[in-house]
Image: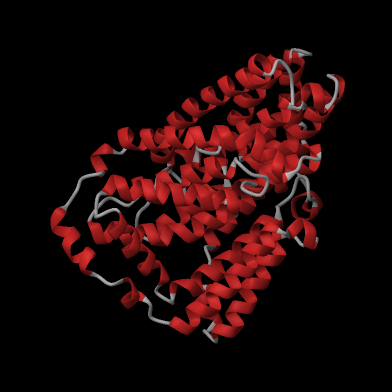
């Protein structure tokens, strides 16, 4: 590896340590690291701001801005309070029942939409209902973001890395359903059991808080019925656009921004007040992280790691599959799953071609998808959905530290990654006796 590569690793390691120890604000650390990468020439302005491979992923940034505007307007209608009361009444005030309902809703929505959008929609509901029932908010938010990442792994549109993989390998929406969804259903069951054990101290039933909640009427929470109608129509079109974006030839970011601007216009709300609700610190954190990871790509660090891993397994498809699951999870945990998949995908293309094409080595793509998707739960920086959830929690006065997230997320990641390895081994090497 070159001197520039080692320097990029050193800068990234220091920044990562600052974020992990909470010694420096995570936004300041991320942006500061990006500025340092640019200042010493480890990446350039062209690569950082205009490259689709190694720069800021503006598609993610503007997708988030559009959805944050929509969520801000929705929040003014009272619909989140409505959903909170509805969920609490269906669970009869029992915390674990409530967690099960919210986890399943989050997972299903993530598979049908995408995990970032789902987190933006479900977090305000969760914060509201937890406060009404007098239960800790953080365990519920963690359970939901874990569910969002697992659920998003099931479909082509559920997680940004899957979109990258589908484009590289020419995979269809139905292919993801056939190969990944069966395992995701099992892993959701594992997640619910995991939550029951890990968060048991937070799942205390407070009967004195339940009575008033059960007596509440959901309808009374709706403050702006007309605005809710407009918001529902716009959101429905946006979600339909997400599902049909390949047919419409429109990026999800364009669809989200269009929906946000249209809703802002018809709502007649003050633009400044709505824009203030956008999580600008979260977006700045993303920008800095994208630039730092781009520098690792530009200096050849990611390529060296990927090449070393593939050289180590050679033509051993089972070894390659298990390495991709474990290695993909590790890289996603450290540097975010989007750039990780972007960097590894060209290597997988070469491996698949060298081992008989999709008919013989297609499981390598599914292994990468599983590793990247399940590794998303390991750390805060592993996925966009995690960063968004932590930002929303911070704004609501419910901070989630790097180590609090990692303590629970890393354990869940180890369990689910092991199960994913067993699934790939059984499905493609034992029961089927070959690749898809």
Q: Reply above or below: 233 against 409.
A: below
Q: Which residue of the protein is positioned furthest toward the left in this rendering?
A: 208
User: In x, y percent, where is residue 311?
Assistant: 77, 16
- Number of numbered discs on residues: 0
The reply to whether residue 40 is in sight is no
Q: Residue at x 32, y 50 (%)?
A: 98
x and y percentages locating residue 235 in the rendered image: 58, 69
The coloring applied to the image is secondary structure
Residue at left offset 31%, top offset 39% = 199
Query: Dividing the picture into quarters, in which one does residue 241 lie?
Result: bottom right
Quarter in which the C terminus is drawn:
top right
* Residue 403 placement (x, y as % from top left): 41, 37
**Vertical comparison of 367 with 162: above or below:** above
For image coordinates 44% across by 47% down, the residue present is 104
Which residue shows up at 19% across the image and 59% down it?
210
Q: Check the picture and name the quadrant holding the N terminus.
A: top right
Could one spot residue 324 in this view of the protein?
Answer: yes
**In the rendered image of this protein, does residue 169 appear above or below residue 125?**
above
* Looking at the image, residue 216 lies above or below residue 298: below
Left or right: residue 216 versus residue 287 is: left
Give x and y (percent) for residue 255.
Answer: 69, 66
Task: Give the side of residue 36 with respect to residue 232, left or right.
Answer: right
Q: Name the image quarter holding residue 315.
A: top right
Comparing 306 with 5, the one in front is 306
Corner quadrant of residue 295: top right
Judging depth in this view, the residue of 3 and 71 nearest the camera is 71
């Amino acid at each position: 590896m070159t001197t520039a590569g080692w320097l990029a690793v050193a800068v990234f390691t220091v920044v990562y340590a600052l974020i992990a120890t909470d010694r420096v604000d995570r936004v300041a650390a991320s942006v500061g690291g990006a500025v340092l990468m640019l200042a010493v020439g480890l990446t350039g302005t062209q690569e950082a701001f205009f490259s689709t491979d190694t720069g800021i992923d503006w598609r993610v940034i503007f997708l988030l801005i559009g959805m944050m505007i929509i969520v801000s307007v929705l929040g003014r209608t009272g619909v989140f309070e409505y959903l909170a009361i509805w969920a609490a009444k269906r669970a009869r005030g029992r915390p674990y029942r409530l967690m099960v309902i919210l986890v399943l809703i989050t997972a299903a929505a993530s598979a049908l939409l995408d995990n970032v959008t789902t987190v933006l929609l479900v977090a305000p509901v969760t914060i509201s209902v937890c406060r009404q029932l007098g239960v800790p908010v953080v365990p519920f938010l963690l359970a939901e973001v874990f569910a969002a990442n697992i659920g998003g792994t099931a479909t082509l549109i559920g997680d940004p890395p899957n979109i990258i993989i589908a484009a590289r390998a020419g995979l269809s929406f139905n292919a993801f359903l056939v190969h990944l969804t069966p395992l995701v259903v099992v892993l959701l069951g594992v997640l619910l059991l995991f939550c029951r054990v890990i968060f048991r101290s937070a799942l205390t039933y407070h009967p004195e808080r339940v009575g008033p909640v059960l007596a509440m009427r959901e309808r009374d929470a709706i403050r702006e019925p007309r605005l809710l109608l407009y918001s529902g129509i716009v959101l429905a079109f946006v979600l339909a656009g997400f599902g049909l974006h390949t047919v419409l030839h429109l990026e999800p970011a364009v669809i989200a921004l269009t929906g946000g601007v249209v809703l802002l216009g018809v709502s007649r709300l003050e633009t400044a007040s709505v824009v203030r609700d956008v999580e600008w610190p979260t977006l700045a954190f993303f920008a800095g992280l994208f630039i730092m990871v781009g520098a690792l790509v530009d200096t050849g660090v990611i390529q060296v790691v990927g090449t070393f891993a593939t050289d180590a397994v050679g033509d051993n498809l089972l070894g390659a599959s298990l390495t991709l699951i474990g290695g993909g999870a590790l890289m996603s945990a450290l540097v975010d799953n989007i750039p990780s998949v972007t960097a590894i995908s060209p290597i997988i293309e070469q491996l698949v071609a060298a081992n008989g094409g999709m008919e013989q080595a297609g499981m390598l793509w599914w292994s990468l998808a599983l590793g990247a998707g399940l590794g998303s739960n390991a750390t805060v920086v592993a996925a966009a959905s995690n960063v968004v959830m932590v930002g929303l929690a911070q704004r609501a006065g419910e901070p989630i530290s790097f180590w609090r997230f990692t303590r629970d997320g890393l354990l869940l990641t180890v369990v689910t990654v092991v199960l994913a390895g067993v699934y790939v081994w059984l499905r493609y090497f034992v029961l089927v006796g070959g690749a898809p």
